[in-house]
Image (cartoon, rainbow, N blue to C red):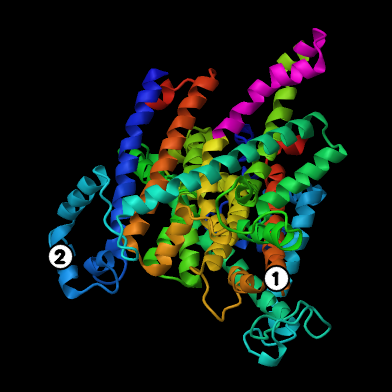
Amino acid sequence: MYQYIARRLLLTIPVIFGVAILVFSIIRLIPGDPARAIAGVQASPEFIEQVRARYRLDEPLPVQFGIFLGDLARGELGRSTFSRRPVATEIGERFPRTFLLATTALVIATIVGVSAGIVSATRRNSMFDNVSMLFALVGVAAPVFWMALMLQLLFAVNLRMLPATGIGTWRHLVLPSITLGMASAGLMARITRSSMLEVLRQDFITTARAKGLNERFVIYKHALKNALIPVVTVMGLQFGILLGGAVLTETVFAWPGIGRLLVDSILRRDYPVVQGTVMLMAFLFVIINLVVDITYAFLDPRIHYQGEAGE
Amino acid sequence: METNEIPGTGAQSHGYEEAEIPAVDLEDEEVSTGTVAAGRRRGVSEWHQVGKHLLRNRGAVIGLIIIGIFVIGAVFAPLLATHNPIQNNLTMRLQGPSSTHWLGTDALGRDLFSRMLYGSRISLNIGLISVAIGVAVGVPIGAISGFYGGKLDIFTQRIIDIMIAFPGILLAIIVVTVLGVGVQNVMIATGIASVPIYARLVRGSVLAAKEQSYVEAARAAGLGDASIVFRHILPNCLAPIIVQSTFQIATSILWAAGLGFLGLGAQAPMPEWGAILSDGRAYIRTAHHLTTYPGLAILFMVLGFNLLGDGLRDALDPRSRGN
């Protein structure tokens, strides 16, 4: 087990290194002068030369990458070509808002999805099962930006119950987090349902029932614990979907998080901010998947990792 | 017999030897399985069973019908369209649905129904082409990585890990940032974003298939590596690839619409659904049909492919077919 965790940790290093290479490449791959891309479209020739010297853009790529890594390690991500403020400040200001939005969405998705999945599995083919599975299908298929607009139209424009855009109070959080969590809720409901049905077929459930245990006790104490293992594994993936979805949700709800920052920066050709935001999102996703994998190893004692370690 | 022991790979256990045509002809699964079955003597019963099972699945049939409607709309768009999709008519701005404009008009007086018909062409094209890119790049990478193992495998797996480190639509956004906006680049971007999914999937299937006795038999018969991988192993991994591709078409359509909505995809005056929705946003209070209908179209198209994917997954899995 500890060997597995150590190996998993070690494997994370090349991945983060590779992510850094990819992010480093963005500015070098776009057509045109990288110095101009870093300095900004309207930068003066003197400033562009300063940037070229600062990032050693005349030297070979490995030297440039070394500079990039060193900056990254110190949290020095350059300056936004739009606001002229340090990228780290821009991101630091907005990240907590995205974190709040994504976590709220994940909590909503987990509560709604897992409970709908359990009830659907225990009352298979009932009205509830059919309706909630239909909702799950629609939740997964509906474009998140469209869902956002429709909820806005209904609850903000027509019913005037909630604010359409902006931040500030908990009421501003309601529509964006429901929108963002909807697809994840649908996916979790489906996974919980099928995993629960699988577990309910197993021998130990039959044994528990044969012992005369209360059905509620069988479901919540015996079955649920086992059925939730696959649900936990997809939660890491869900967080990724949420981060991706945040880009769209934040745009519609004018939620000033890093998703909206990324889109705005791409449209403004503010490449230093693009670099920083992409790096942060990928880094977060890698760390979260690491945590999920390790949690999984603890949760499921049936799995032995020796085989994989021998590869 | 032994292939039936690997879940999801038993469907094409024997005789089926064309490795080059995975997933691309998914548009009309029912017909394509029928033709393939007709063409392969020993494969007939397998494909026939899959088709029969699929048609007994209510969700899959609904999915096929939905996809069918969109395909007809896309193919016959020039005949079905009531107006020119990109011609402005400023006297007819922001009209609600009526008998002349079935779904109303947009801010430039263009007919929404006609625009959406042409839009289904764009979305279906993006879905199919991006999946074709993902399959064409991802499947060989996964197959070679799984088959040869060793250092090559470790290296490709790390590359795949790096690609997977970018959650969901983010990798596609990065690719579009580098390549520039436009429908073609969106196809490439969503295609690249699906490469790691195929590489992972096929690697796993190849690792399982590699140990089977038919591979040993092929090797004993003196076949080369390429021939073993492409003519014997990959055809047996076709089922999961087909299922994944169906879902991936749906995902690509969603991602492309998202990119279009963000202004990173199709550019004006192209009637791409995400872009239409994005244009309509400004008028949501007075002319919400501009956002409602394109969204519903995306929803139904994605739903159709997801339902078909669910059905195919069951139909191609001999274990669930038994029940």
Query: Do the residues bearing badges 1 and 2 touch, measured as CB atoms within 8 Å?
Result: no
Whole-percent x and y of residue B86? 62, 85
Identify which residue, B323 or A23, lies in the foreground. Answer: A23
Q: Quadrant of residue A209?
A: top right
Is A210 magenta? The answer is yes
Instruction: Determine whether A114 is above or below B310 in the image.
Output: above
As drawn, the residue found furthest toward the right would be A127
- Crowd rating for badge 1 (residues with CA inside 10 Å; few <14, some 14–19, many 20+): few
Q: Left of B301 or right of it: where is A304?
A: left
In the picture provided, is A205 more to the left or to the right than B247? right
Snapshot quadrant of residue B283: bottom right
- Chain identity of mark 1: B
A126 to the left or right of A66: right
Give neighbour class at mark 2: few <14, some 14-19, many 20+ (Cα, 10 Å): some
Residue drawn at 36 percent across, 42 percent down: B158
In the image, what residue type sits under mark 1?
A: Arg
In this view, B294 is above or below B242: below
Say which residue label 2 marks: A50
Q: Quadrant of the C terminus of chain A?
A: top left
Label 1 to label 2, Cα distance in Å? 49 Å
In the picture as drawn, the residue positioned furthest to the front comes out as: A169
Q: Which chain's residue wears label 2?
A: A
The residue identified by callout 1 is B285
- Label 1 SS: loop
Q: Is residue B280 visible?
A: yes
Q: Quadrant of the N terminus of chain A?
A: top left
- Chain part drawn in magenta: A208-233
Q: Horizontally, is B13 left or right of A212 in the view? A: left
Can you give x and y, in whole percent of width and height, for residue B286 in the image? 72, 74
